[in-house]
Amino acid sequence: LKIKESYEFRRAYQKGKSYVCPFLVVYCFKNRYNRTRLGITAGKKIGNAVARNRARRVLRAAFREVYPFIKPGFDIILVARTKTTFTKSTALTPILTAQLGKLGALQSTKEV
């Protein structure tokens, strides 16, 4: 499921936990639904439309790899940074996994 409404993004920014690295920023917020929702943003600072779309595509592909290990019931916002457009999703997957682990959104190895 996608997060599209601006109030849902604002709620995650204000009340959720965040983790920053040079490639992306991850906001994680426990929602009331029993499903994981994803929102991706790429601001104009990233570059033109082609660069922003590439950044979103790379983040979506990295998230797809991590998705099976995420606990249900989280809103996850991925914010692209300038370095995101120059990396591959395979390089972002371990970074995203580590960040979600620190935020407590991943299932423990016993549950998987």
Image (cartoon, rainbow, N blue to C red):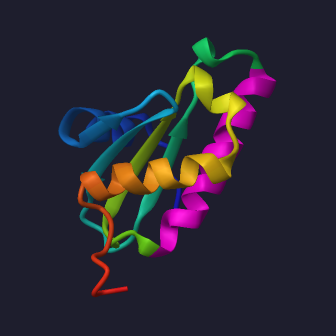
Write the start and end of the magenta stretch as one range.
49-68
Residue depicted at x 52% and y 32%? 23
Res. 99 visible in picture = yes
Residue 72 vs residue 26, the one in the foreground: 26
Residue 83 vs residue 68, the one in the foreground: 83
Res. 3 visible in picture = no
The location of residue 19, given as percent across then percent down, is 31, 38
In-image side of 111 versus 38 (left or right) = left
Quadrant of res 5: top left
Residue furthest out toward the left: 15
The location of residue 9, given as percent across then percent down, is 38, 38
Residue depicted at x 51% and y 64%? 66
The location of residue 13, given as percent across then percent down, is 29, 34
Q: Is residue 29 magenta?
A: no
Image quarter in which the C terminus is found: bottom left
Q: Is residue 61 magenta?
A: yes
The location of residue 56, given as percent across then percent down, is 65, 39
